Image (cartoon, helix red, strand yellow):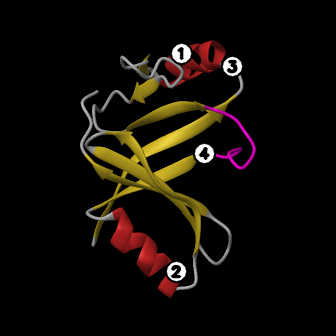
Amino acid sequence: MAHGDITHIDIPVSDLKAAAAFYGGLFGWQIEAPPGFEDYPMWRAPNGISGGGLAPRGEGFTQPRSYVEVDSIDETLARVRELGGTVLLEKSEISPTSWWAVLADADGNAIGLYEGSTEV
């Protein structure tokens, strides 16, 4: 069902250009928007492993959110419900080969899920 690696962290921002300048200057992150995702610049840390995105801040998305890679979002969401968690966002397509969803644990912590592969 899940292999549990944290693979991505989204940071909610109000001004994408200012945020890219801030985080790039502060941490040396390489930040650019992949084709087709111009409103979602992706960041990559100097280690070449850590990464995520600068996502538009909005209702329900006001704090950074970590994403855990799973083998099956459908199976993971079923297990979330069995264990008393809440599904905040059902499985949604990113690309034809990748999907995401958001859950909340019993304490209300929002965690993203990721399944698939993307070419970035």
**Label 3 sits on residue:** 15
- Figure check: 92 above or below 3: above
Front residue of this view, candidates 49 and 104: 104
For image coordinates 28% across by 40% down, the residue present is 96
Position of 79 relative to 72 (above/below): below
C-alpha distance separating marks 2 and 1 = 41 Å
Residue at point 71%, 25% (across, down): 14
Marks 2,4: beta carbons within 8 A = no
| Distance from the alpha carbon under mark 3 to that under mark 4 | 15 Å
- Please tell me which of labels 3 and 2 falls first in the chain: 3
Q: Which residues are magenta?
A: 56-63
The CA span between labels 3 and 2 is 35 Å
Majority secondary structure in the magenta region: loop
Comparing 47 with 74, the one in front is 74
In the picture, the disc for residue 25 is 1
Residue at the image position 38 percent from the left and 30 percent from the top? 45
* Sequence order check, earlier mark of 2 and 1: 1
Q: CA distance from mark 3 to mark 1?
A: 15 Å
